[in-house]
Image: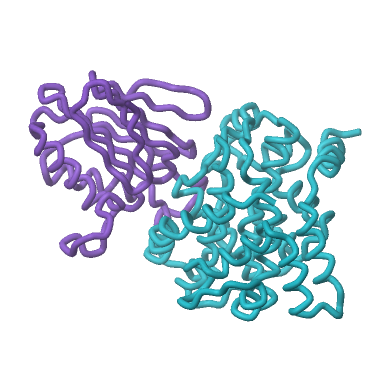
Chain colours: A cyan, B purple
Amino acid sequence: MSRREDIIEKASAIAHMPMPVQKVLAYIGNPDADLRQLAKIIAYDPGLTVNVLRMANSSFFGGANKVSTVKEALTRLGLNRVYQLVIASGVAPFARYEIKGYGLRPGELLEHSVAVAAASETLARELEITAPPHTFTAGLLVNIGKTVMGSFLEVDAAPILTLAHERHIPFEQAEELVLGINHAELGAILLERWGIPTPIVNVVRYRLRPDDCPEPDIALDLVHVGDVIAKMTGIGMGIDGMQYVPSEAVFARLDLTPQQMENVMAAIMEQIAEVRDILMDNTL
Amino acid sequence: MEIVVSISDMKVTSRAKDVIVTHALGSCLGLAAYDPVAGVAGLIHCLLPLARDSKAPQKNPAMYVNTGVPQMMRAMFGRGATRENLILKAAGCGRMMHISNQFDTGANNFAALQKLLQVNEMHLSAEDVGGTIPRTMRLFADTGRLVISSCGRSWEL
């Protein structure tokens, strides 16, 4: 068995989505899914309910009027948004671990992931375009492969980084040379096996190399730049630092100006604390 | 005591036993200042180079090089530090690989600092800037010793 196959097999065996999240995802996959029934399923699980309500009431997702039931949250935010928040709640715990091999203390990767997600959505607002509904969740999930490699599989990233520095290649390319797979692809494979919708999986798969994506995808473009912005701010950054190459094609496609990028960097500093606290507090 | 400076934040101390530290400098600028005569140490972690209107009151002046660095120096002068005695060392200002110059916030942060120092006829005594590595800065208030750490290694600046 190659190192790549070994990693995929071990990762699939270890990591699972929490049960309440699996139930909700399975229900939404049902063509007869309706809002009331979904509200009931979520309401049966205290952890999930708290997460959905806190997110619906946060200034980042919600509005001025507070909601107190899951049904109200569903009406306020819409089925799609709540669905995204449920996925986010299910996968966030993976980002809370210490990722020793990648030089991340407990909670740091979650902080970084929240920064990517917040930057991706804020970028859309700054550019005055509508972010596809899965943008935030996809942004939150882009590092799940890193958690699995660095925490569950105890990969030591130091020799990978040394190789990247020596050869002046991006970190994910060095991961491929050493492990036979990079953390973005491993994350995508896992999410696919968990039944996470394809648009999210695609963003996770291609976020480091958006030029390889067969079709242009606005969510991918936003998350790619959101990821670049989060890395530059240094929030929850691991030893791989900024050893990655931004896509000029994406920057051109979004027609982004340096001032807009700086505005997003300044804005996310306030947003991330709120979202991080919600995801950090509630374990599923 | 260890005093942590977060992103867009600044701390000044006159207590010799303090260590001021800032983690995860990406493209941000970290500037350490130390006056050995007055025994005052300061550290700032700036996210961006320029506040668009530097005269207007800022919600958080430490976010920007052009408002935060002068603010830190004023705080240090208030504790007895003088411009002549101040030892300045910069770190951070990293960049993504091959990022185009206009989006190179790290380089812009460093340029903003250089311009500010030039106008005020001050200079850096050491710098460790650029590249793709994340950096942590530790300033020891007893001696002004500055230690940079990254990827499990540490060195003195």
Q: Nearer the viewer, residue A188 or A65?
A: A65
Residue placed most toward the observer, B30 or A2: B30
Q: Quadrant of residue B18?
A: top left
A242 horizontally vs B89: left or right: right
Can I make out residue A142 in this image? Answer: yes
Decide which of A117, A168 is in the foreground and name it. Answer: A117
Classify the position of the C terminus of chain B by image quarter: top left
Q: Where A19 falls versus A56 (above or below)?
A: above
List x then y, in percent, for residue A78.
65, 78
Q: Nearer the viewer, residue A59 or B45?
A: A59
Give the side of residue B126 with respect to residue A178, left or right.
Answer: left
Q: Where does the image place residue B84, in percent across and percent down from the top left?
A: 8, 30
The answer to whether residue B58 is above or below residue B26 is below
Residue under the point 62% across and 61% down: A50
Q: Is residue B87 visible?
A: no
Q: Among all residues in the image, which is located at the extreme right? A: A1
